[in-house]
Image (spheres, grey):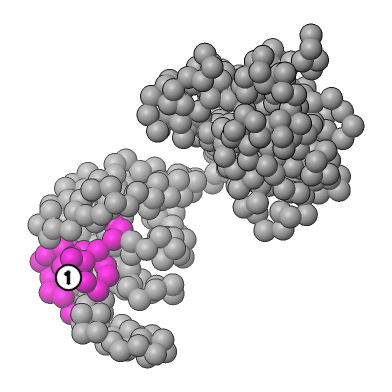
Amino acid sequence: MRVELLTIGDELLIGDVVNGNAAWLGRRLADHGVDVTRGVVVGDELDVIVAAVESALRRADVVITTGGLGPTYDDLTREALAKAAGAALVRDPALERRLRERVAAAGRTLEPMALRMADVPEGARVLPNSEGSAPGLRIELGGGVVYALPGVPHEMRTLVDATVLPELEERAGLPAVARRTLRTAGIWESVVATRLAPVERMDGVRLAYLPSPGEVRIRITAAGADPGALLAEAERAARDLLGDCVYGTGDESLDRVVHRLLAERGATVATAESLTGGLIGAELTAMPGSSATYAGGEVVYATELKHRLLGVPAELLERHGAVHPDVAAHMAAGVRDRIGADYGLAVTGVAGPDPQDGRPVGTLHVGVAGPGAEPVVVSPRLPVAAGGPEARGVVRRMTVVQALELLRRTILGLDAEPGTQHARKDPEE
């Protein structure tokens, strides 16, 4: 079954809104064994939408559109589907009644243009929208099917899960499949793919690599007579090949894993951040209940503050500057002791766009000081070229991942990455 996506809206074309609906749809459909063959973005222009729908139906069995179903006069998806079908738009009494009741319940006055959301192309089926005012539509055109969904993300997602996916699975007669996503941190995509080559060769198994700054997710799909058993076999093989680089599965994020590990030990962590400016603390406080394991932190951009607030020796800072593995070690121990946490986590480095003290952009030192232990420091060289705010953002995001991963490894008693651990030196040496 061939499926194409058509996302509609001027705001998508000019970059005011990132096309998150297409990204979510692609992932969701793939997770259910439905492959998307093409995605197109068009603006709010009637004839352009009609042409895009007709073009997609010449190639695809199913077209899924998002956007253009709202109440304003630039919401033209209903009109476009009616024109493509050679059908009239008809006011649906049940939809009109629902709109009036919904508006009255909110204590508002119904604007006449809002009733446009009750117009349906003849021959189309209404897809009830429990999350909003604009319903979805399903219409058969040119031997294919078009699902028109609202552009509001949570409304679109509800309709996909409730209606579109079950119908697509039934229509396609998809084979039974089983899926699992493994999550890794601190290991490059090429390394992951090289290690997993034996799993790639397993019959009935397909791997997809989903990289983001500092992390790689591996989606394993197994299909066959017993997909669950095959998936279990493939996952075991993948874990054996990747070892302790796997930190979680599914939607389990690295910060949640760290919180869980700390909670199991009744421990807390404090952070000291230079180049990330509080991003690690923000990541560690995103989860509800994080105050049980995150004690607090210090943002110490100025070199002098590293000495005054965290006790980094002045001689060390004068001799080597703020970007040095021993500075990261002292920062980690200092924030641990001053805040009274069990673990101290610290980062210092060069985010860019310019080098600092002769160190290139992407230089990074991460330190973790555990309970009563000497700090461990890793110094990965982040592969980011200097120049521009985008590189700076990537360095900062990768730093957050590297920091949380070192904390995870330290809590579990795992070795730091080979070749990156530094022995703690006395600054006087």
Query: In which image quadrant can residue 188 be found?
Result: top right
Identified at 32% across, 40% down, the residue is: 37
Q: Is residue 277 one of those drawn in magenta?
A: no
Report the front residue among 358 and 224: 358
Q: Residue furthest top?
A: 429
The residue shown at (50%, 17%) is 360
Q: Residue furthest right?
A: 372
* Bounds of the magenta segment: 65-90
Q: Residue at x 33, y 61 (%)?
A: 151
SS for tag 1? loop
Residue 112 placement (x, y as % from top left): 21, 84
Residue highlighted by disc 1? 73
Q: In the image, what residue type sits under mark 1?
A: Tyr
Q: Position of residue 393 (x, y in %)?
A: 46, 35
Query: How far across and how far down the image is residue 136, in percent?
Result: 33, 68
Residue 163 visible to an observer of this rendering: no
